[in-house]
Amino acid sequence: MSVVPVAREFTTARRLAGFVALTKPRIIELLLVTTLPTMVVAAHGIPRVTLMLATLVGGTLAAGGANAINMVVDRDIDAIMRRTRNRPLVTGVVTPGQALAFALALEVAAFGELWAAVNLLSALLAVSAMLFYVFVYTLWLKRTSRQNIVIGGAAGAVPVLVGWASVRNTVGWAPVVLFALMFLWTPPHFWALAIRYREDYRSVDVPMLPVVASFRRTATQILVYTVLVAVVSLVFAWTAGMGPLYWVSAAVLGVMFIGYSWQLWRDPTEARAMKLFHWSITYVTLLFVAMAADQLIFH
């Protein structure tokens, strides 16, 4: 039996909140946590305040636009999954046409703002992340491949390149290694959450790894990736010439990240997976804070 949507009236405040929700603010926060410390490393100190603000504003606009387009594309499955049933396109607070126009406006604004206030390379990198996220991950891989988040996660690693390019107007080995770090961090971070919502993904035929592989297989993959993350974090220390604070922090945080993954592998439960998910956010936050602090203290 089909369900006929019921027309509803929404207050202006509710609609504005719906447009904000389209941008997925919590995801943007994490992207900005990686951008600013990268700028500090690239500058070997605190960059100009105006440059930091311009980069963060442009990055926020670009990421917000990409997330909004993702919601437009995924509104059919969002209506079925428990985790996403209250998203603005599902509830009707925002229409698909309004959401798409809003998203495109954000992308145009992001490109123009970054080009005018930062540099062209940063603008191109930010928009390329959006294109990759929308066309490679959302439209192609998400519903067709178990490697969806592995490859698609590259989009979430681009902000470190934007941050570096905003200061240096170029990209070298150090930011590329940092990009690799975030690229490798994304799968274990997202798979841990997907373990909890695997039935949601199964209900809409999205082949996230916890849906198409056993719990133990997923935990094994998570463990492998966390080991790689820890190793690459130390490679970055060598490549970027980091000081002792970062070296020690990267080593300790990496061991803890591996420890959480090892516990999940030994005891593959949903509770362990969520502990790993929350720690993965803490890990990347503390690692980048240590990165910035190291530069301010030892350079």
Image: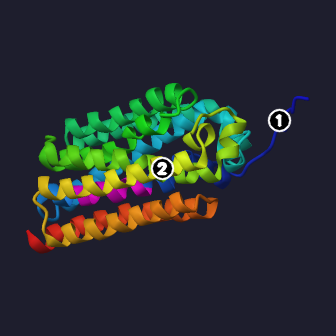
Sooner in the amino-acid sequence: mark 2 or mark 1: 1
Is residue 92 in sight in this rendering? no
From the top left corner, tell me how far across and down residue 162 is, in percent.
26, 45
Please indicate whether residue 291 sits to the left or right of residue 280 in the image: left
Q: CA distance from mark 2 to mark 1?
A: 43 Å
Residue at the right extreme of this rendering: 1
Residue 117 is labelled as none
Between 82 and 226, the one nearer to me in the picture: 226
Residue 5 is labelled as 1
Badge 2 marks a residue whose secondary structure is helix
Q: Which quarter of the picture shows residue 29?
A: bottom left
Residue at the front extreme of this rendering: 266
The stretch in magenta equals: 29-38
Give the residue displayed 39% in from the left and 44% down from the top.
156
Quadrant of image for the C terminus: bottom left
Q: Is residue 18 above or below residue 73?
A: below
Is residue 130 in sight in this rendering? yes
From the top left corner, tell me how far across and down residue 147 is, in percent.
47, 34
From the top left corner, tell me how far across and down residue 91 is, in percent.
73, 44
In this figure, what is the number of numbered marks? 2
Type of amino acid under label 2? Thr
According to the picture, the residue beneath numbered tag 2 turns out to be 220
From the top left corner, tell me how far across and down residue 145 is, in percent.
52, 29
Type of amino acid under label 1? Pro
